[in-house]
Image (spheres, rainbow, N blue to C red):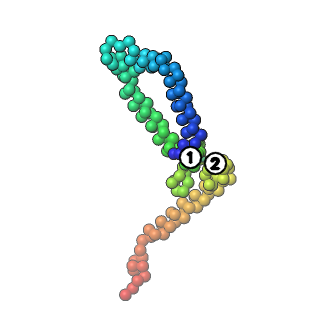
């Protein structure tokens, strides 16, 4: 997935703003960080850290797994057209792609009308019947004399 340049620039700007704010208010930010990570007012080395903030490190893996699962669900069901945020529910190219109605070539950017649904349904039924007829034709038993070949 390519990140849009404006998102990248905004993220870099936000990080730089945070760093500058931290540097300008280093004393109060460092104290706040030490208190909230359990490094201030210690009874022993790292005791408060592992009793407080450090005990949550394992929970970050659970959050990471949940975020990864959501990302994979998004990848699976999101419309395969680049940049589209809709849910893709219509298979295209024999199921190779999953597209939203807006990007599916059969629907031409509109929700499928009743006429289009009926037309596609009839075409599907005709294809299925042609396939069944072809299958029945190829599975006919051979004639008694071996298909007319005589020697
Ligand atoms: Zn789409």
Q: Residue furthest left?
A: 44
Tags 1 and 2 touching, CB below 8 Å: yes
Q: Name the residue nearer the viewer: 114 or 23.
A: 23
Q: Position of residue 72 (x, y in %)?
A: 47, 41
Q: Cβ of disc 1 within 8 Å of ligand 1? A: yes
Q: Cβ of disc 2 within 8 Å of ligand 1? A: yes
Examine the image and state in which quarter residue 44 appears.
top left
Circle 1 SS class: loop
CA–CA distance between discs 1 and 2?
9 Å
What's the residue at 53%, 52% (across, down)?
97
Vertical comparison of 84 with 127: above or below: above
Vertical comparison of 16 with 106: above or below: above
* Residue with the mark numbered 2: 102
Vertical comparison of 130 with 25: above or below: below
Q: Residue furthest front?
A: 24
What's the residue at 59%, 40% (across, down)?
6
Figure quadrant of the C terminus: bottom left
Q: Earlier in the sequence, mark 1 or mark 2?
A: 1
Q: Name the residue nearer the viewer: 26 or 100.
A: 26
Q: Position of residue 135 (x, y in %)?
A: 48, 65
């Amino acid at each position: 997935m390519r990140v849009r340049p404006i998102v990248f620039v905004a993220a870099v700007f936000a990080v730089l703003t945070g760093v500058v704010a931290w540097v300008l208010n280093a004393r109060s930010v460092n104290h706040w960080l030490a208190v909230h990570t359990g490094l201030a007012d210690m009874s022993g080395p790292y005791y408060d850290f592992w009793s407080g903030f450090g005990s949550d490190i394992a929970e970050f893996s659970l959050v990471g797994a949940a975020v990864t699962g959501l990302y994979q669900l998004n990848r699976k069901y999101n419309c395969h057209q680049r940049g589209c945020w809709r849910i893709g529910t219509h298979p295209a190219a024999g199921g190779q792609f999953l597209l939203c109605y807006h990007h599916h070539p059969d629907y031409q950017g509109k929700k499928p009308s009743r006429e289009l649904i009926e037309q596609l349904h009839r075409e599907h039924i005709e294809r299925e019947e042609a396939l069944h007829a072809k299958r029945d034709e190829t599975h006919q038993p051979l004639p008694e004399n071996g298909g007319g070949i005589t020697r």
